[in-house]
Amino acid sequence: MKAVHFFSILLLIISIDSYACTSCIVSGKYTKDGKAVMFKHRDSSCQDVAVEYFQGEKYRMMCLVNADWRTNPLAKVPLGTPEAWGGMNETGFAIMNTATYDLKDDDVPYEMMDGEGLLMYRALEICETLEDFENFLDTLSRPMRVEANFGVIDEKGGAAYYEVNNYKWTKFDVNIEPLGYRVVTNFTMTGRPEDRKGVDRYIKAHRILASTYVPMEEWDHNFFIKNISCSGAPILRDITSCAIIFEGKTMWASLGKPNQVPCLPYKL
């Protein structure tokens, strides 16, 4: 029993460390072209990632995926089922997520969780606006199998974070943020303070953005890669797998350690 108990704790620790991301959305009110900019620095146990193109039910889309999604027998979804860990569709609707560990307040077994990749893939298939995404959340069957922050932007200027658990969601509109942007790591504003993760990365990212001499209208993909992703510990970590940035209808991605690989553009 002791060995099994220790192994279970070890798996929990690995799980928590393996899905830790740092993110930011900048309101289009302050950017050069009037479009929101959305950034995600991904920490994951999966280090082999790719950008792939799909034809969804309604829209074409490009998605950040784990490169082994077709063959990984350990995935929680049926073999060959795509999951998106960020992406954009042809309408300019884009979505990303960060894991959270303070929001689940139910008895849904953890083996039924981790549905964020499926949720984002489906949203990219059918959503054009933030309102579409909100309707999507409202009409999903419960439990939704997620515990996460979702960042969403659209071509009409919408920009928001959604704190989502199995049964409810809360919206934070970035366009009314006093700072003009919102930083999110691995905790929520509506969850349990004692279970927050990623506070150190949240503080560092805020400190970098508050102290930079670069005006907000110049916060583009290069700015976020150089100043956030490549800023060193605790943001740049051994488990960092990539960074993605959405600008207009372009998805920029460093597929690997951002301080070691170039940031390249992807378009539909």
Image (spheres, rainbow, N blue to C red):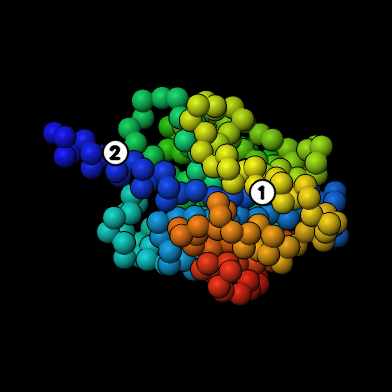
Residue lying farthest to the left in this orientation: 1
Please say if 101 is above or below 49.
above
**Residue at 45% in and 25% down:** 105
Residue 266: image quadrant is: bottom right
Could you tell me the amino acid type at mark 1?
Answer: Ala
Quadrant for the N terminus in the image: top left
Q: Position of residue 168 (x, y in %)?
A: 54, 28
Observer-nearest residue: 100 or 125?
100
Q: Where is residue 133 in the image (x, y as percent from the top left)?
A: 62, 43
Q: What residue sits right under mark 1 in the picture?
A: 205
- Describe the element under mark 2 as helix, strand or loop: helix
Q: Distance between the residues labelled 2 and 1?
A: 30 Å
Q: What residue sits right under mark 2 in the picture?
A: 9
Q: Tell me if I can see residue 166 in this picture.
A: yes
- First-in-chain label (2 vs 1): 2
Q: Residues within 10 Å of mark 1 (few under 14, many from 20)?
A: many
